[in-house]
Image: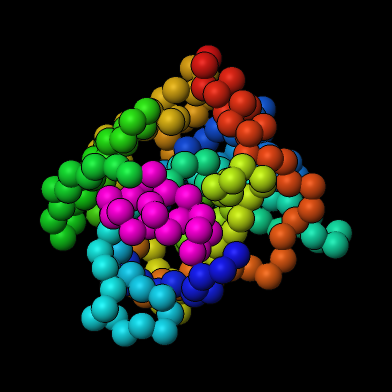
Amino acid sequence: MSGFRTLRAQVRRRLLISYRVTPAVAQTLIPEPFRPQIVDGSAVAGVCMIGLQSVRPGWLRPRLGFRTENVAHRIAVEWDEAGVTQSGVYIAERHSSSLLPVLAGGRLFPGVQKCAHFKLDETASRFRVAMSAPGTRVAVDVELGGPWTSSLFPTVEAASAFHEHGAVGWSPRRDGTGVEALELTSSDWMVEPGRLVSVQSSFFDGLPEGAAVLDSVVVMRDLPFFWDTPSRVPERVASHSETVRLTEGSRSG
């Protein structure tokens, strides 16, 4: 793919909301050769709601970047490369408040984005973020801090490590011929525990009853992030058209 190899941004706020998902249902949401990453008998999926500023190609100065709100619906996955198991996430949907990522995603840089409208009501310790787009709606209310509660991750450090190790995000190509990847890194990776006051996601709420159960949330704030394109791509990746058929079938109940 032509375009910029590296993107940089400053993360104002990133909410990583995790769900326990029935492995059989999670498998219908992802193409081969990926398989759900299993923790304590469940697949792990979730919503990433990220507010970015100073978004720019790696060689531009921060003052030339732009600001955007984004949402990604993700499933933690594994795949094999040369006999070694790798981990990352498969991103079924991406939405953005900015027209530039929508136009450039999947063209100048991996990651197809859809247009969405966002409403923000945030303080230093509470994050109310709502996103609406044709066919998709997300609304979250998260408080910073409080005791850590999760059936997937025994500690917030374990949750942090899980998300950091899933740095490679795969998503459908714009032309439907397979998937493409972005790898996210940060020189100052740090998460804080959060409390889920309320969460609505049409993506997860639309799965069969009981297939997706809210688990936990971690918060990231004021950190530099980098996105790069990995050099290796797994073999035997199914086409986007097959993935769409599987996803629609699983969400019909």
Residue 96 magenta: yes
Q: Residue furthest right?
A: 83
Q: Is residue 32 visible?
A: yes
Q: Nearer the viewer, residue 231 or 198?
A: 231
Q: Is residue 234 left or right of residue 130?
A: right
Q: Is residue 197 left or right of residue 210?
A: left
Q: Residue furthest top?
A: 253
**Which of the colour schemes (rainbow, by chain, secondary structure, one colour) is used?**
rainbow
Identify which residue is drawn at 15% across, 52% down: 122
Identify which residue is drawn at 68% across, 70% down: 231
Q: Is residue 75 left or right of residue 24?
A: left
Q: Is residue 101 left or right of residue 241?
A: left
Identify which residue is drawn at 17% across, 48% down: 120
Q: Position of residue 249 (x, y in %)?
A: 59, 20
Residue 249 magenta: no
Relative to residue 98, is residue 240 depicted above or below? Answer: above
Q: Quadrant of the N terminus?
A: bottom right
Relative to residue 146, is residue 168 depicted above or below? Answer: below
Q: Position of residue 101 (x, y in %)?
A: 37, 57
The range drawn in magenta is: 95-114
Identify which residue is drawn at 24% across, 42% down: 117
Question: How many numbered discs?
Answer: 0
Q: Is residue 166 visible?
A: no
Q: Position of residue 76 (x, y in %)?
A: 58, 47
Q: Position of residue 203 (x, y in %)?
A: 43, 31
The image quadrant that residue 201 belongs to is top left
Q: Nearer the viewer, residue 10 or 248?
A: 248
